[in-house]
Image (spheres, helix red, strand yellow):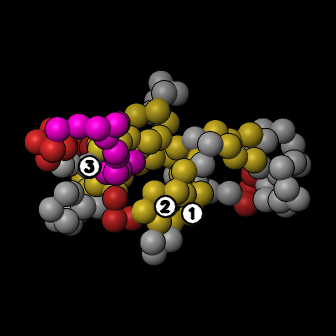
Amino acid sequence: MGDSTLKPQDVFMKLVLIEWLDSHAGRGWQDFEDIQKASEPLYCRSVGWIATEGKDCIVLVPHLAGERNGDIAIQGSGDITIPNGAVINITTLERGPDDNFARLARKTVNDSAGILHALEDEETR
């Protein structure tokens, strides 16, 4: 659990849905034709708070604890590091008027062709 001194007031993290591409492997011996047909990356979606956004990767944490427990350090669990080159879309989520999380904005970082898109506000759709 570590000796972190990070307190709730020190943390501002965005809750996001990240769509990304991952590699995958076949199982056992297969006809070469079947292997060639599987030549596309695996589409993945992950939801969590962005702990770190670096030049090479994003670290996403789906589970947080301690933010309402007084003066204790915030803890995270289930973190995943996603390379920036694998990210297709990042959708920022925000608590809506009914206290549920709703899509706020969708940012298309790149698609499989590497095309960059601008930030879109969900309200204008």
Secondary element type, mark 1: strand
Q: Residue at x 24, y 61 (%)?
A: 110
- Looking at the picture, tell me which residue is in the foreground, 45 or 100: 45
User: What x and y, as percent, mark residue 103?
Assistant: 36, 39
Residue 94 belongs to magenta span: no
Secondary element type, mark 3: loop
Q: Residue at x 88, y 49 (%)?
A: 71
**Residue 41 visible in the displayed image:** yes
Instruction: Return the mark for residue 52.
Output: 1
Counting every numbered tag in the picture gives 3
Q: Is 22 left, or right, of 118 in this rendering?
A: right
Mark 1 Cα shell of 10 Å, populated few (<14), some (14-19), many (≥20): few
Which range is magenta?
Answer: 18-31
User: What x and y, as percent, mark residue 123?
Assistant: 26, 42
Residue bearing mark 3 = 41
Secondary element type, mark 2: strand
> At label 2, which amino acid type do we have?
Ile
> At label 1, which amino acid type do we have?
Thr
User: What x and y, as percent, mark residue 65?
Assistant: 74, 40
